[in-house]
């Protein structure tokens, strides 16, 4: 395998709106991010992925871009962005921006021009279809609910939006669209970006000609998965994009890819793949239902283990996954993968170590390093996220009472991860001096960065140790490039694996509150990490405490 600069890095995702507000308007901004670079450097972060901060009406919190060449004034200025890139560079850190090019905003000038002249050049930037009475061009359901078709204002046409109606899909079949996108990517790479996280990218290829599929809910619509299964040839777009942009700059790219087919893996992330890496969403999708969030099942420890191990086995040493336990689209991992009764610093640390030590590039989502938790929503009025509002309606339509519907969607709401970052125990968790745009989790008095910095046993300090271990010259090669082999895979509520390279490491997590004993296959030389102060040993066996996690060198 050819070594790449990003293989041994640690990445951190920032959701700019909720990270740090420097000017008191209640919205996080780029100067706020700059003020926290030292914190991130001290943690050991090398790569920072920024969720979108381009000009945007923020209908989907910036994933609806109205100008790819500008920064939204709420987040700062282009000078701030350049300053951020420069300040990061001083600290040997790389900035990734979010590449959102499946769709733009309906307030982008391309879309405005398409409305003004749908048969002209810009009409062909989108997927437009003539209106035919009440009949929709296809029966596909948008990811955010309702039909994917919406009237094109001022015309007798409709346009396609796989996401929100304020996010019209760009027509990638049109070479002029692709040229515009490559031009913009290169423009940003010229500014010194390290690369991009690539949003919703599988959606850029549509199955043509458009057709209906069997409806799967009462609304008479069908999931977009049907169309995506039929869409062949996304690789032509992706390889062209790689060659025209990332490759020339040796830039890092990580794809948001769901439902990849086994044969896709080598071409997606193998040597000279379309992307440098792609996220492992195996645990995120576990237990989800086609009916909606209200029907999702909790993920058990054994399911968690099997998802993650299966994903590792699918990839093998073909390439690198990017490992996450949460992001801005998910609830907090410590809520999703640990039961309410068992959530504690110990169980949070166990989850961190199990995920972090897997083969791949670890991504930490802001606040994850503090063990930040879901918000307890008491009313749907507190929800901002469009996906949650849609799923609430889906739950009501399925017959749930408003209380039940709120309870069901609160567990999965994207707002759980979007509450302001908890910096300290002053008002609004030190995030802003103004009124935060989204409620701060009231647990900030207990869970915050300042308190945890000073507590050697905190979740934050544990993350620091994990990162330091990944960077330790002695173990680095094994942790980055070593193989992953599951051990005792059938043991209930136990997740354990070897990382084998020039060293042999054994990672063991007791994924339950009860103790359990494991016999060691070989004596260990060193305990590299332990989330308890001690280790209970009885001849060649270890009696693990509840949620104990160990990293041993054999
Ligand atoms: C991705 C983003 C999500 C956004 C969607 C549409 O899934 O992560 O936040 O809503 O794409 O851009």
Image (cartoon, grey):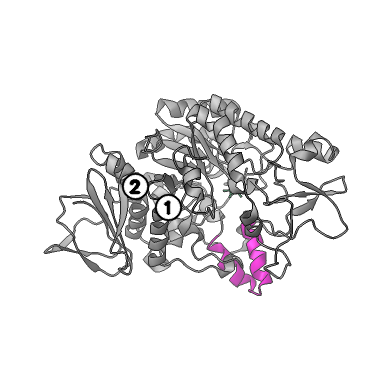
Magenta region includes residue 388: yes
Per the image, the residue denoted by label 2 is 463
Return the x and y of residue 124 as percentages of the image width and height: 77, 39
Q: Nearer the viewer, residue 143 or 257?
A: 257
Magenta region includes residue 211: no
Residue 333 in view of the camera: yes
Asked which secondary structure carries label 2, the reply is helix
Is there a contact, CB below 8 Å, between mark 1 and mark 2?
no
In the rendered view, does 499 fall on the left or right side of 296?
Answer: left
Residue furthest out toward the left: 539
Q: Which mark is residue 130?
A: none
- Label 1 or label 2, whichever lies nearer to me, is 2
Mark 2 Cα shell of 10 Å, populated few (<14), some (14-19), many (≥20): many
Per the image, the residue denoted by label 1 is 445
The magenta-colored residue range is: 387-412
Q: Quadrant of residue 238?
A: top right
Q: Nearer the viewer, residue 209 or 71?
A: 209
Residue occupying the point 66% across, 56% down:
227
Asked if 249 appears above or below 367 in the picture, the reply is above
Residue 19 in view of the camera: no
How many marks the image carries: the answer is 2
Return the x and y of residue 134 as percentages of the image width and height: 85, 60
Mark-to-mark CA distance, 1 and 2: 20 Å
Q: Nearer the viewer, residue 57 or 191?
A: 191
Q: The N terminus appears in which quarter of the rendering?
A: top left
Asked which secondary structure carries label 1, the reply is helix
In the rendered view, does 328 fall on the left or right side of 300?
Answer: right
The answer as to whether callout 2 falls within 8 Å of ligand 1 is no
Asked if 426 appears above or below 486 in the picture, the reply is above
Sooner in the amino-acid sequence: mark 1 or mark 2: 1
């Amino acid at each position: 395998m050819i070594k790449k600069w990003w293989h041994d890095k640690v990445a951190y995702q920032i959701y700019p709106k909720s990270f740090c507000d420097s000017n008191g308007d209640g919205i996080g901004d780029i100067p706020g991010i700059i003020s926290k670079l030292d914190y991130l450097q001290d943690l050991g972060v090398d790569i920072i992925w920024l969720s979108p901060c381009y000009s945007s009406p923020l209908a989907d919190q910036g994933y609806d871009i109205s100008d790819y060449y500008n920064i939204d004034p709420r987040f700062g200025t282009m000078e701030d962005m350049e300053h951020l890139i420069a300040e990061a560079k001083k600290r040997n850190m790389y900035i990734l921006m979010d590449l959102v090019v499946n769709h733009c905003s309906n307030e982008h000038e391309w879309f405005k021009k398409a409305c003004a002249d749908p048969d002209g050049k810009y009409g062909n930037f989108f997927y437009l279809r003539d209106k035919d009475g009440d009949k929709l061009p296809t029966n596909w359901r948008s990811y955010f609910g309702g039909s994917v078709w919406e009237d094109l204002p001022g015309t007798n046409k409709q346009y396609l939006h796989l996401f929100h109606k304020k996010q019209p899909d760009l027509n990638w079949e049109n070479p002029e669209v692709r040229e515009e996108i490559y031009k913009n990517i290169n423009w940003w790479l010229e500014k010194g970006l390290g690369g991009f996280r690539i949003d919703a990218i599988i959606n850029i290829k549509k199955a043509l000609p458009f057709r209906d599929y069997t409806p799967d809910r009462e609304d008479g619509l069908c999931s977009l998965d049907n169309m995506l299964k039929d869409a062949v040839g996304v690789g032509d777009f992706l390889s062209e994009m790689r060659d025209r942009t990332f490759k020339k700059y040796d830039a890092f790219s990580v794809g948001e890819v769901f439902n990849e087919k086994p044969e896709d893996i080598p071409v997606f992330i193998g040597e000279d793949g379309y992307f440098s890496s792609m996220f492992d969403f195996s645990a995120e999708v576990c237990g989800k239902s086609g009916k909606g969030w209200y029907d999702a099942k909790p993920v058990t420890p054994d399911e968690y283990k099997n998802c993650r191990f299966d994903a590792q086995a699918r990839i093998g040493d073909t390439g690198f996954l990017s490992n996450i336990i949460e992001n801005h689209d998910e609830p907090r991992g410590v809520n999703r993968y640990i039961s309410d009764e068992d959530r504690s610093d110990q169980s949070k640390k166990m989850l961190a170590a199990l995920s972090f030590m897997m083969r791949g590039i670890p991504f930490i989502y802001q606040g994850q390093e503090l063990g930040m938790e879901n918000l307890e929503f008491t009313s749907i009025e507190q929800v901002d996220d469009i996906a949650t509002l849609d799923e609430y309606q889906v739950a009501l339509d399925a017959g749930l009472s408003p209380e039940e519907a709120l309870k069901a969607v609160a567990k999965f709401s994207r707002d759980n991860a979007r509450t302001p970052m908890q910096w300290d125990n002053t008002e609004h968790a030190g995030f802003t001096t103004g009124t935060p745009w989204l409620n701060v989790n009231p647990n900030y008095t207990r869970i915050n960065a300042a308190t945890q910095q000073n507590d050697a046993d905190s979740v934050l300090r544990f993350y620091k140790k994990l990162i330091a271990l990944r960077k330790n010259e002695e173990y680095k090669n094994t942790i980055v490039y070593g193989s992953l082999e599951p051990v005792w895979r059938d043991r209930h509520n136990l997740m354990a694996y070897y990382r084998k390279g020039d060293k042999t490491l054994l990672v063991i997590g007791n994924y339950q509150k009860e103790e359990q004993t494991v016999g060691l296959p070989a004596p260990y030389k060193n305990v590299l990490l332990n989330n308890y102060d001690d280790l209970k040993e009885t001849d060649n066996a270890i009696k693990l405490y509840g949620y104990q996690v160990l990293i041993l060198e054999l």
